């Protein structure tokens, strides 16, 4: 069993709050992690209809039975319990009473904001990071881009094609239909495939609407559901314009590149290697790595992108305290002079030093070139550690 990097953060939250909520997409390992970190806790799953009915019909009786040191798994399926949990933890007035998990950010966070605000520490668990996977074996970037990072692929040795087919049919459709009444399955699947072709791109809902034959409002509704289920997320633009007109639309990213490859019909790492969207998929993978490292450390930095109306762009802006770092992402394994164009433009525009610029590429060597930091795709954790340590 692979040790998850977020484990220390969860333990710290548990010492600070009466409850810890572990949230994230289905199959990201929330239940396994909770059981591993809190081995001596009683485990209750609300996927079990008996537990669900007990909590709904007799919440006081339920909490009388499960008073303390309990894992409540998929608690959004018993939302009525939340208010009673609030009363229970307030009465006990001690930290470290419950661990709750959930796969629906919208449903769970709505209940937390209503009933448990100030009482719960939130930890977001995404699929494996490269740091975590390196504890198991060495992988090539092509294999990881194609296979994605969901734990069951590696723990159970499931073929990615089989895993994602099941994931789409069983989890995405079920979760989506729990939140929205979507009748035309084929239209929604087309929407997913169109969206997969736009990962790493500026969000254009009008274009998606036209390609899918659905209304603009439907696009927004379905996007909100995918965000709530941790299938996609939006990366917002950096707010400073530096006397330039900057675009205000976010970029859209999937939280897993294996799912993107499945939706695009990519059949192998070799096919991905020559695919016209490889650059976007690689960028998605790298942005996800930063997102995972940030969640695992307790949200210590902010991530943006920057683009003006002349299409001058920096793939990622990392803000840590008062420091701002420009980061370019290139899938090529051989460094080309034009890889630095965006960083050089960014430095001229902002007056930044070259040492605050990073180029992350498809190779594995780390070194300085033209005073910029060259970072291999598998060294994101080391790069972040260097930034944090100053």
Image (tube, grey):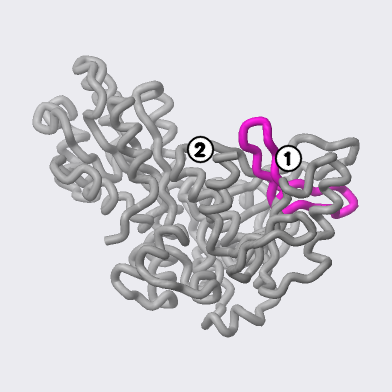
Graded by Cα atoms within 10 Å as few (under 14), some (14 to 19) or many (20 or more), the crowding at tag 2 reads few
Q: CA distance from mark 2 to mark 1?
A: 17 Å
Residue 303, by quadrant, is top right
Residue 213 appears in the figure: no
State the image coordinates of residue 154 (x, y, percent, origin top left). Answer: 35, 69
Q: Which mark is residue 238?
A: 1
Residue 377, picture quadrant: bottom right
Category of crowding for the residue at label 1, using alpha-carbon neighbours closer than 10 angstroms: few (below 14), some (14–19), many (at least 20) = many
Q: Secondary structure at mark 1?
A: loop
Q: Start and end of the magenta stretch?
A: 305-326
- Residue 151 within the magenta-colored segment of the rendering: no
Q: Which residue is mark 2?
A: 299
Q: Residue furthest left?
A: 65
Answer whether labels 2 and 1 touch (C-beta < 8 Å): no
Does the magenta stretch mainly form a helix, a strand or a loop? Answer: strand
The relative height of residue 68 versus residue 225 in the rendered view (above or below) is above
Residue at 62% in and 36% down: 320
């Amino acid at each position: 069993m692979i040790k998850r990097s977020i484990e220390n953060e969860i333990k710290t939250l548990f010492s600070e709050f009466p409850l810890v909520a572990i949230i994230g997409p289905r199959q990201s390992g929330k239940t396994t992690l909770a059981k591993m970190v809190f081995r001596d806790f009683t485990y209750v799953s609300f996927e079990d209809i008996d537990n669900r009915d007990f909590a709904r019909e007799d919440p006081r009786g339920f909490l009388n039975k499960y008073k303390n040191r309990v894992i409540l798994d998929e608690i959004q399926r018993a939302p009525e319990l939340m208010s009673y949990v609030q009363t229970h933890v307030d009465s006990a007035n001690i930290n470290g009473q419950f661990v709750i998990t959930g796969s629906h950010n919208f449903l769970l966070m709505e209940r937390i904001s209503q009933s448990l605000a100030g009482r719960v520490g939130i930890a977001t668990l995404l699929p494996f990071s490269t740091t975590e996977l390196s504890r198991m074996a060495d992988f090539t970037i092509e294999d990881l881009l194609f296979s994605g990072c969901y734990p069951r692929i590696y723990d159970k040795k499931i073929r990615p094609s089989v895993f994602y087919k099941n994931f789409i049919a069983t989890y995405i459709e079920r979760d989506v239909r729990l939140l929205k009444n979507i009748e035309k399955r084929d239209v929604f699947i087309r929407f997913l495939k169109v969206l997969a072709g736009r990962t790493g791109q500026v969000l254009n809902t009008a274009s998606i609407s036209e390609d899918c034959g659905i209304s603009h409002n439907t696009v927004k509704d379905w996007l909100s559901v995918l965000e709530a289920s941790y299938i996609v997320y939006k990366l917002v633009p950096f707010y400073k314009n530096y006397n330039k007109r900057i675009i205000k639309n976010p970029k859209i990213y999937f939280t897993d590149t294996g799912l993107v490859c499945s939706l695009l019909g990519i059949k192998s790492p070799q096919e991905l290697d020559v695919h016209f969207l490889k650059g976007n998929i690689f960028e998605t993978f790298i942005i996800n790595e930063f997102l995972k490292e940030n969640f695992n450390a307790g949200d210590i930095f902010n991530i943006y992108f920057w683009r003006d109306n002349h299409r001058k762009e920096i793939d990622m802006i990392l803000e840590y305290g008062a420091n701002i770092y420009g980061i370019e992402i290139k899938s090529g394994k051989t460094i080309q002079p034009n890889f630095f164009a965006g960083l050089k433009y960014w430095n001229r525009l902002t007056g930044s030093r070259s040492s605050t610029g990073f180029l992350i590429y498809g190779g594995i060597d780390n070194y300085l070139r033209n005073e910029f930091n060259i970072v291999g795709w598998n060294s994101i954790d080391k790069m972040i550690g260097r930034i944090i340590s100053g």
